[in-house]
Image (cartoon, rainbow, N blue to C red):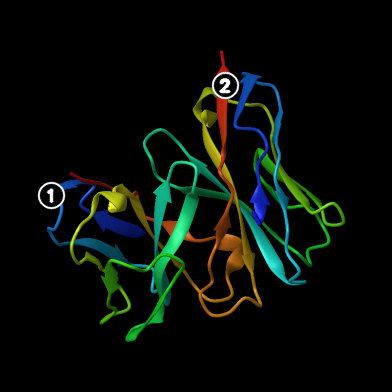
Amino acid sequence: NAGVTQTPKFQVLKTGQSMTLQCAQDMNHEYMSWYRQDPGMGLRLIHYSVGAGITDQGEVPNGYNVSRSTTEDFPLRLLSAAPSQTSVYFCASSVTGAFRYGYTFGSGTRLTVV
Amino acid sequence: AQKITQTQPGMFVQEKEAVTLDCTYDTSDPSYGLFWYKQPSSGEMIFLIYQGSYDQQNATEGRYSLNFQKARKSANLVISASQLGDSAMYFCAMREYNAGNNRKLIWGLGTSLAVNP
């Protein structure tokens, strides 16, 4: 069971470039989300989805887009990268009601914007 | 206002000893869950243990237990018989179940644990 797979693991972008961070899960979880992790700020929710075709904004959505065309995939798009988006990005998924199993996280994408 | 507070930025423990990592939380939602995650130097987030606000007993998972004191709003993680592989960052997080559809986890800033041989 692969769990949550994120690609790439590392990425360097120039200011103004766009890119897509990929997230795929094979656990049939209906809920998927993106967090960013910054020193001194903890993890913050960017966007989330409660099922295919349904997405919504989290706490820090500006500069990011998401879509959810299938249950398995939840890509995060950076529209025009800025140095403030330098961070570690995590995709996480969960199944409704099974709180005791926690949220399953991907291994993260370390993004540097120069 | 910070909802999850982890007051110990760094902790040291000798191998095979027990260690307690502190977490206090603030919420007015009567229905909530508390999570602990481990983040080793490799960077991934590993789920350790969960405690629901209505659970009558403290959660346990192997060497991990959660000392849940609801009136004091604390949810401390206890690691028994520490191992070198326990060296990592540990995060406490909370989900408020009546806070809407986003199922957001609210995170503390973490405690760095070093296990000494």
- Answer with left or right where residue A84 lies relative to residue A29: left
Q: Chain of mark 2?
A: B
Quarter that holds the N terminus of chain B: bottom right
Image x and y of residue B5, in percent: 67, 46
Label 1 residue SS: loop
Q: Mark 2: which amino acid?
A: Val
Image x and y of residue B88, in percent: 50, 32
Determine which quarter of the picture holds residue B9.
Answer: top right
Image vertical order of residue B109 relative to residue A95, above or below:
above
Q: CA distance from mark 1 to mark 2?
A: 39 Å
The residue tagged 1 is A14
The residue tagged 2 is B115
- Answer with left or right where residue A90 lies relative to residue A42: left
Residue in view at x 65 percent, y 52 percent? B4
Q: Chain of mark 1?
A: A
Image vertical order of residue B8 relative to residue A100, above or below:
above
Quarter that holds the C terminus of chain B: top right
Q: Mark 1: which amino acid?
A: Lys
- The single residue placed furthest to the right in the displayed view is B71
Determine which quarter of the picture holds residue B116.
Answer: top right
